[in-house]
Image (tube, rainbow, N blue to C red):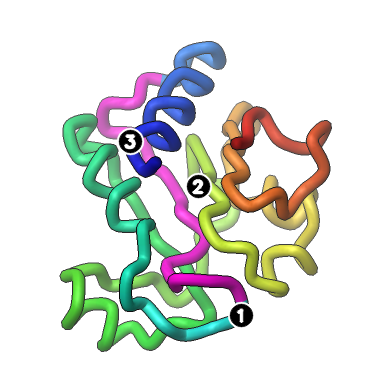
Amino acid sequence: MGAFVASQTIKLMARQKINPVGCKILILGLAFKENCPDVRNTRVIDILASLKPYHAEVDVFDPWVDAAEAEHEYGIRPIAAPVPGGYDAIIIAVGHRQFKDLGADGIRAFGKPNAVIFDVKYVLPRDAVDGRL
């Protein structure tokens, strides 16, 4: 599933004429499930692995996850907060309530003007995202 999410995000970027090589991507969520700090068995690492060939700079933000635990388990150091206006693509990978509370405008604010949003967990309405499962 991670490969599918990554490939769909890359396709959406291509439609917007965003070069995926060296781009900046934000992944919202690392935990195994929403509103939970558990990173065991998270499939978000599959998305990260599938983006690796593009040499994209990928930031992972998860307000529930302990950064030291994520780094110990997966070698991933989640960021403290996303950079507003800094991302070419945003992948909503976990349906945390904080992401729902941000809404479409709040999440889109993390992206550059033509950034794409791929919503894995149906956090946002269909018309607010560029792609979803």
Q: Is residue 43 left or right of residue 63?
A: left
User: In the picture, which quadrant includes the C terminus?
Assistant: top right
Nearest to N terminus: mark 2 or mark 1: 1
Per the rendering, the mark at residue 86 is 2
How many angstroms separate mark 3 from mark 1 (CA)? 24 Å
How crowded pointer 1 is (Cα within 10 Å; few <14, some 14-19, many 20+) is rated as: some
Q: Mark 3, mark 2: which one is toward the viewer?
A: 3
Residue at 47%, 85% (x, y): give it: 37
Judge depth for marks 2 and 1 and give the one in front.
1
What's the magenta region?
19-34
Sequence order check: which comes first, mark 3 or mark 1? 3
| Residue shown at the point (79%, 50%) measured from the top left | 105
Q: Quadrant of residue 79?
A: bottom left
Identify residue for label 3: 3
Q: Amino acid at mark 3?
A: Ala
Q: Above or below — where is 93 with respect to 100?
A: above
Q: Which mark is residue 67?
A: none
Percent from the top left, x then y, of residue 75? 16, 70
